[in-house]
Image: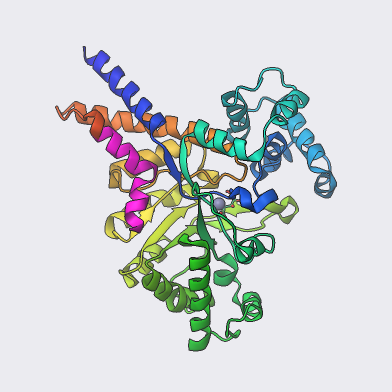
Amino acid sequence: MTLERTTSLRALVHEIVDDTPVFDIHTHLYDAAFGDLLLWGIDELLVYHYLIAEGFRWMDMPFADFWALPKARQAEAVWQALFLDHSPISEACRGVLTCLNEFGFDVKSRDLAKLRAEYAKWNTADFITRCCEVANVRKICMTNSPFDDLERPVWERGFARDERFVAGLRIDPLVLDWPNTAPKLRAWGYDVSADLNAKTFDGIRRFLADWTRRIDAQYCMVSLPPSFAFPDGGATSQIIEHAIMPHGREHGQAFAMMIGVNRGVNPALQLAADSVGATDVGAIERICAAFPDNKFLCTLLARENQHALCVAARKFRNLHIFGCWWFMNVPTLIEETTRMRLELIGTSCTPQHSDCRVLDQLVYKWRHSRTIIADVLADKYEDLAATGWQPTRAEIERDVHTLLGGAFEQFLQ
Ligand code: RAT
Ligand code: ZN
């Protein structure tokens, strides 16, 4: 009897988690209006930088020779090294197979030419819809950088928005490299100088306001190194305090901090060159305390920071924690992190975002994460049931909606 009830509760939780559409709050995907910036298909899946980093562990060609190859040859080299010469066990490799399988393509043939032929039957518009359906994604937040020379002109020209794609204003160069960013803002008509004075902060605020309006940004976002300190009197700290914070209050916009990336530890790997380091969660607590009228979103890259971040969220209701970012996005760490978050702050968080760079990846990132989230959640409901508190279907649906984007939307309101 108990076992039966337990089994059906677990099955119900899985069913609800699978059936609840998700708001994917951080990706590197683009509205189709951005043309080639939206990546999809088998070759793009294979040259995902997560796979390239793994491929180089087996491939013995010089880094530069690999980068000189056309994309199709790069994809073939990765396929050979990671799928044919060895079993594709890593999370990123498994993800490719999950996508192919869920699309109904022939995984077991190991035939790249056949897979390319399957993909050739699709066009971009239909494939977007197909991915959103299979992954059950209701909204996708892009990463939109005014500093990207390919992306900026599209915004400046304007286009009819696809309402499935919402924008996130990404401002790394502004926060991390003011000396080289000031001339760009000046060239775009903002009265700023290398000097961080009142006039410069005003100019930065105008820039942020213009782009927030232009792209209708959900939040403004930066990725930061493990050494991020606050407050420390440096340029990053001053720009946050005197430009981003007042901008956030004026526009009711949250500031998203992704902390813990050491950029370019092995530059020869290009996009795959970055590594991880633990940060001082005290800096996050200080910024939340210093600006109680601002809202903060935060995800951290280092496993060893996750517990302290949960504790910080217990102290500051203007802090919303999200995602298992990048190197955290593997089943072992998603499970551990999700369990800890539920135990420390209940459902007042967003356990996962996809960080997809290739449209197809929505399918695997959400398939894999949904299974783990459902299992952890089922354990928690079973613990409740053991006390006599039987969660109802409506309560479970509410909670799952909360975890898959609802809490994020409520936090931003
Ligand atoms: O996960 C990734 O693809 C990384 O390369 C980064 O893009 C990271 O997610 C970021 O947003 O900086
Ligand atoms: Zn990202």
Seen from the viewer's position, the closer of residues 74 and 53 is 74
Was residue 402 drawn as part of the magenta stretch in this picture?
Answer: yes
Near-viewer residue (298 or 229): 298
Residue at position x 70%, y 26% in the image:
118
Residue 171 image-quadrant placement: bottom right
Asked whether residue 226 is in view, the answer is no
- Tell me what residue is drawn at x 62 percent, y 52 percent: 33
Q: Position of residue 56 (x, y in %)?
A: 74, 41
Magenta segment: 395-413
Query: Where's residue 237, x and y in %?
Result: 47, 74
Q: How is the image coloured?
A: rainbow
- On the image, which quarter does residue 309 sit in? bottom left
- The image shows residue 247 at horizontal and vertical percentages of 43, 73
Q: Position of residue 285 (x, y in %)?
A: 35, 64
Image quarter of the N terminus? top left
Residue, far top = 1
Label the magenta part by its dominant secondary structure.
helix
Magenta stretch containing residue 251, yes or no? Answer: no
